[in-house]
Amino acid sequence: MSSTNLTSAAERVAQLALLHFADRGYDAASLNDIALSAGIKKASLYAHFTGKDELYTSVLNIALQSERDYVDAQFSSEKAGQAPGELYMLNLRSRYAESGALRFLLRAAFYPPAAIEQRVKSGFEHYLDGMRGRFLASLETRFPAIGSVHANLIAEAYLALIDSLHVELIYGNEAAYARRLDALRQLVSIVGLTLVEGTASR
């Protein structure tokens, strides 16, 4: 059962489960606790989901859609003077603090349940591909003269640095996060300045 065809009752259970999985991970999350938080008995949970794997998969689909929508909104809200991808980058820490969906998604990507590991990895890779596509579109709109080779290289570097921020969000090293964010901001500024100068010289 995917999140697109959940009943309203199942959707409510999945939304509550999202927070449990985000905070506890797959192994430590309890179906009984999830059922209690939904105000139902554990047996009633099986009327909506065949088991933990199906519930987790539904939660994964909800989290992926939520974060894809957020990425789209961030890139659509970029203003003149901001480098491509800068708004998403600057808001990443606060998004992680506020969004159970992102906390779930990163925890799932770093610690995927063995039984559905490939499904988790595939979903997360598709999510990153979407971010890469939005970054490329922003870059090419801002700098139409940039060649595809340079654009793709910059997009890969951006994703690598975003992923390094993900690592620090998961492992909770505030100093390392701040250091990497500062490095990424400087790199984005340097790349943007180089592209502006290159465009002006053409």
Image (spheres, helix red, strand yellow):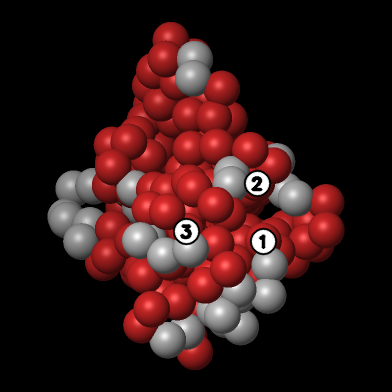
Residue 41 on image: x %, y %? 48, 63
**According to the image, label 2 marks what residue?**
26
Q: Rounded to the nearest whole Å, what is the CA distance between mark 1 and mark 3?
A: 12 Å
Q: In the rendered view, tell whether residue 185 sits above or below residue 202.
A: above
Of residue 138 and residue 112, the one placed in the foreground of this image is 112
In what quadrant of the picture does the N terminus appear? bottom right
Q: Secondary structure at mark 1?
A: helix
Residue 134 on image: x %, y %? 44, 66
In what quadrant of the picture does the C terminus appear? bottom left
Q: Residue 191 appears in which quarter of the rendering?
A: top left
Q: Earlier in the sequence, mark 3 or mark 2?
A: 2
Q: In the image, 188: left or right of 22? A: left
Q: In the image, 81: left or right of 173? A: left
Pointer 2 and pointer 1: residues touching (CB < 8 Å)?
Answer: yes
Residue positioned 55% across, 62% down in the render: 42
Q: Which amino acid lies under the numbered mark 3 shown in the image of this protein? A: Ala
Crowd class of label 1 (few under 14; some 14 to 19; many from 20; radius 10 Å): some
Q: Secondary structure at mark 2?
A: helix
Report the label total.
3
**According to the image, label 1 marks what residue?**
52
Q: Is residue 145 visible?
A: no
**According to the image, label 3 marks what residue?**
35
Which-is-in-front pick, marks 2 and 1? 1
Q: Earlier in the sequence, mark 2 or mark 1?
A: 2
Q: Secondary structure at mark 3?
A: helix
Residue positioned 54% across, 30% down in the render: 170
Q: Is residue 52 visible?
A: yes
Q: Earlier in the sequence, mark 1 or mark 3?
A: 3
Crowd class of label 3 (few under 14; some 14 to 19; many from 20; radius 10 Å): some
